[in-house]
Image: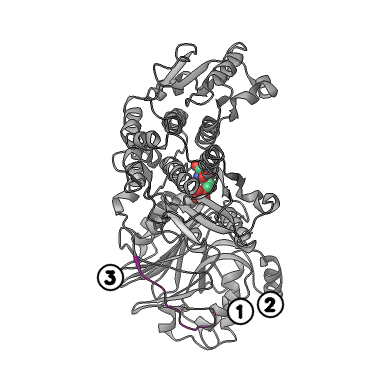
């Protein structure tokens, strides 16, 4: 899940491309590169490491200015993060440059055929077959666009590809002497990987995601699978693979460039944790009326024909989906939550009365998209609960429900977990109200009443948290365990995932009752146990925490100050008193801060943790 960008305009593209890559770096940071056309042949600069390293390289060896260019930031799938494997990749002539996000499944066959034709390969990547294919076809066709289309038609797998050609090298002798204006263009295509077109004033952008060009424009076109785009100084053309024009809607995204910046914070993750009072207020706004859930997307009666609900998701979104599943089970609705990567082998019987809810902040996670397609193929109705308007999940599912958290740049999801869980809690009550024999939560009015306090209560946690002190106190621990029951179990798993993602330390979440069935063997005085009290099953959680304490483990209670468990442990992280459904989210903010401070103490790359990327667009 790399980040690609392309730009055609009137002035120099280099800085715009580099800024775009910085804004895309949450998609992968193993290597970075750009290629510029400036009429004296392609200028390619690329290296392993982050965009900063690339900028240093360009300062030392400038590309010279050029109005047309492409760029890439990489998350390695084929070949280690080396200079050779960095994109852009070129063909043997050096006249064709390509950047790509996705996986070319038939690259080995194509590579062997091309090597037989005398093409020389320099990298281990699947992507490198594309520039060689384009070069192969431009030898036998009379124009680059056709050569590009032919090359794309040979690819199997997932791709968002952008290519430029510059044969202005003196003595370059491609057989038909491609006419220069043909080369004043970017050629691009998408299948299975995201690609958006940005409409600037006299400049056009293509990118894997909107933050890449948000500082230039927020007028966008979401490209569909099978679209081919040609960007030229005069404008852009969108066609299908055969060349037949297709029309696509233009949208204006209501994100402002500030959203894509860190503001006064050292890290996007810290900024996003602190921005939860605002993002939650946006998530809640207009969705509760007169003590009832009011979703404009799903008016009363929208779910009367539903008799079972499945949730599919990955990572943090899976933990939010557990919120939905728990609340529906409480409402006596047949429900299950599935890890999307396992869905096709665990789906069980579904039909047109099954509602499959795909939870995905990016809306681009390949495993979750595959699960949506599987569910649709089996006749189920699908809903995407996502943060990104126009994302593939939002467009492929039958309906979309947005969590409205605003752009999230930090790889570790924080504010989107809170907004997903609230959105799912509201959705479950809307569903339960429609399904015969289902009973919405009995104190729904109290739950919804206390929801309006949640943004301020999160503010209180963020402003008063002592998680930094505990992060320092337990930093040398051998492992970190998180326990809870019911909704507290989802929070324990989420707390552990956050801790693992950004500290690289051993952390695990358990349902509290499971400890004594094995994991307790791991517990020592060097393994603090963070115990989440949400108001459901707290006595049992306290018993389980005491079992760990009797093996020497330091116990950290996360509960309201007047909770009976406070004082029984070795440390305490306070949360305001609220409805059990929301208590877990307040506790989770404490765990987000704990992870953040521990990672900061350890000097970790908090926004770009090793080996990870923000949206996982490959299976
Ligand atoms: C969470 O911090 C991670 N970034 C990861 O587990 C993420 O939640 C998962 O990849 C799902 O992403 P999605 O919500 O965009 O589908």
Residue hosting label 3: 201
Gap in angstroms between the C-alphas marked 1 and 2: 9 Å
Q: Quadrant of residue 231?
A: bottom left
Q: Residue at x 42, y 53 (%)?
A: 300
Query: Which tag, 2 or 3, sits closer to the chain's start?
Result: 2
Q: Residues within 10 Å of mark 3 (few under 14, many from 20)?
A: few
User: Magenta stretch?
Assistant: 241-251
Residue 50 in view, yes or no: no
The quarter of the image holding the C terminus is bottom right
Residue 167 pos. (x, y %): 48, 78
Gap in angstroms between the C-alphas marked 3 and 1: 35 Å
Residue hosting label 1: 136
Residue 480's label in the rendered image is: none
Residue 165 pos. (x, y %): 48, 75
Q: Residues within 10 Å of mark 2 (few under 14, many from 20)?
A: few
Q: Residue at x 61, y 50 (%)?
A: 340
Residue hosting label 2: 117
Q: Nearer the viewer, residue 191 or 125?
A: 191
Q: Is residue 374 left or right of residue 565?
A: right
Residue 599 pos. (x, y %): 46, 31
Residue 527 pos. (x, y %): 58, 20
């Amino acid at each position: 899940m790399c980040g690609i960008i392309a730009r055609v305009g009137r002035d120099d593209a280099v800085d715009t491309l580099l800024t775009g890559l910085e804004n895309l770096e949450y998609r992968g940071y193993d290597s970075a590169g750009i290629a510029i056309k400036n009429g004296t042949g392609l200028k390619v600069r690329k290296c392993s490491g982050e965009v900063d390293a690339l900028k240093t390289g360009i300062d030392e060896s400038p590309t010279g200015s050029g109005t047309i260019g492409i760029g890439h930031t990489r998350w390695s799938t084929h070949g280690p993060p080396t200079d050779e494997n960095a994109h852009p990749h070129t063909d043997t002539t050096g006249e064709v440059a390509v950047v790509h996000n996705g996986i070319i499944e038939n690259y080995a066959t194509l590579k062997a055929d091309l090597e037989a034709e005398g093409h020389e390969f320099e990298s281990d990547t699947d992507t490198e077959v594309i520039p060689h294919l384009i070069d192969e076809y431009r030898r036998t066709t009379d124009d680059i666009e056709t050569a590009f289309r032919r090359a794309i038609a040979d690819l199997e797998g997932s791709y968002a590809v952008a290519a430029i050609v510059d044969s202005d090298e003196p003595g370059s002798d491609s057989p038909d002497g491609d006419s220069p204006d043909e080369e004043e263009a970017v050629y691009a295509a998408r299948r299975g990987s995201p690609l958006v077109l940005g409409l600037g004033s006299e400049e056009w952008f293509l990118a894997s995601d909107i933050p890449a060009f948000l500082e230039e424009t927020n007028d966008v076109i979401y490209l569909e699978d099978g679209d081919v785009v040609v960007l030229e100084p005069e404008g852009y053309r969108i066609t299908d693979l055969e060349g037949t024009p297709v029309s696509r809607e233009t949208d204006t995204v209501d994100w402002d460039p500030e959203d894509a910046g860190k503001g006064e914070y050292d890290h996007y993750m810290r900024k996003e944790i602190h921005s939860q009072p605002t993002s939650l207020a946006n998530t809640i706004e207009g969705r509760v009326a007169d003590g009832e859930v009011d979703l404009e997307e799903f008016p009363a009666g929208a779910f009367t024909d539903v008799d079972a609900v499945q949730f599919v998701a990955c990572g943090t979104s899976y933990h939010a989906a557990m919120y939905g599943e728990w609340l529906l089970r409480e409402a006596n609705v047949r429900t299950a939550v599935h890890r999307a990567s396992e869905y096709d082998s665990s789906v069980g019987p579904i039909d047109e009365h099954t509602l499959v809810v795909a939870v995905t902040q990016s809306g681009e996670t390949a495993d979750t998209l595959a699960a949506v397609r599987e569910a649709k193929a089996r006749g189920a109705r699908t809903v995407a609960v996502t943060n990104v308007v126009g994302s593939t999940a939002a467009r492929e599912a039958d309906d979309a429900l947005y969590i409205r958290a605003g752009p999230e740049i930090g790889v570790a999801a924080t504010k989107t977990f809170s907004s997903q869980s609230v959105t799912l809690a509201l959705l479950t009550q809307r569903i339960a109200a429609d399904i015969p024999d289902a009973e919405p939560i009995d104190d729904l009015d109290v739950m919804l009443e206390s929801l309006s306090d949640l943004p301020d209560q999160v503010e209180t946690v963020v402003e008063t948290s002592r998680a930094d002190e505990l992060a320092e106190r337990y930093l040398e621990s051998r492992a970190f365990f998180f326990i809870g029951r019911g909704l507290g179990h989802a929070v324990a798993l989420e707390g552990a995932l956050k801790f693992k993602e950004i500290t690289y330390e051993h952390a695990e979440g358990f349902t509290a009752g499971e400890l004594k069935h094995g994991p307790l063997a791991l517990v020592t005085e060097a393994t603090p146990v963070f115990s989440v009290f949400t108001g459901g099953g707290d006595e049992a959680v306290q018993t389980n925490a005491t079992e760990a304490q009797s093996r020497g483990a330091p116990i950290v209670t996360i509960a309201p100050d007047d909770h009976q468990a406070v004082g029984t442990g070795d440390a305490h992280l306070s949360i305001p008193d609220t409805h059990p459904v929301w208590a877990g989210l307040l506790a989770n903010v404490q765990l987000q801060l704990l992870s953040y401070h521990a990672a900061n103490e350890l000097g970790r790359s908090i926004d770009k943790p090793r080996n990870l990327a923000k949206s996982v667009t490959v299976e």
